[in-house]
Amino acid sequence: MSQPVIVDTKPIILALEPGTYFWCSCGQSQNQPYCDGSHQGTEFLPVKFVLEDKKQVALCQCKYTSKSPFCDGSHSKL
Ligand code: FES
């Protein structure tokens, strides 16, 4: 099993507008925290999430969360 690239060891806090987003799970995107297609050729896939309302979110940047795309504190164990 491949390991994701750790982008940061803390989440990124964003106030997002309603819409559909694709979170990068591989850590190789140059457009973090979103997928830019760089996962092609790996076993990783982006994680789609939909926000119905404007919302502040904490998106995982270490890529080890078990609640993707959201931070679950896993970065503190790396
Ligand atoms: Fe990382 Fe697409 S670039 S999942």
Image (tube, helix red, strand yellow):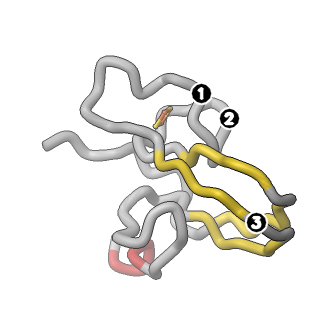
Queried on whether the Cβ of the residue with tag 1 lies below 8 angstroms from ligand 1, the answer reads: yes
Residue depicted at 26% across the width and 45% down the height: 3
Image quadrant in which the C terminus is located: bottom left
Q: Going by the picture, which residue comes out furthest to the front?
A: 52
Give the mark count.
Answer: 3
Residue depicted at 56% across the width and 32% down the height: 29
Nearest the camera: 53 or 28?
53
Can you give x and y, in whole percent of width and height, for residue 68 in the image? Answer: 45, 63
Looking at numbered disc 3 in the image, what kind of residue is underneath it? Glu
- The local crowd at label 2, few if under 14, some if 14 to 19, many if 20 or more residues have their Cα within 10 Å, is few
Q: Secondary structure at mark 3?
A: loop
Queried on whether the Cβ of the residue with tag 2 lies below 8 angstroms from ligand 1, the answer reads: yes
Closer to the N terminus: mark 1 or mark 2?
Answer: 2
Q: Secondary structure at mark 2?
A: loop
Can you give x and y, in whole percent of width and height, for residue 77 in the image? Answer: 34, 78
- State the CA–CA distance, disc 1 to disc 2: 6 Å
From the viewer's perspective, tell me whether residue 66 is left or right of residue 51: left
Q: Which residue is mark 2?
A: 31
From the viewer's perspective, tell me whether residue 6 is left or right of residue 29: left
As drawn, 50 above or below 73: above
User: Label for residue 52?
Assistant: 3
User: Label for residue 36?
Assistant: 1
Q: Are marks 1 and 2 in contact (CB under 8 Å)?
A: yes
Can you give x and y, in whole percent of width and height, for residue 71 in the image? Answer: 52, 73
Q: Going by the picture, which residue comes out furthest to the top?
A: 41
- State the CA–CA distance, disc 3 to disc 1: 23 Å
Looking at numbered disc 1 in the image, what kind of residue is underneath it? Asp
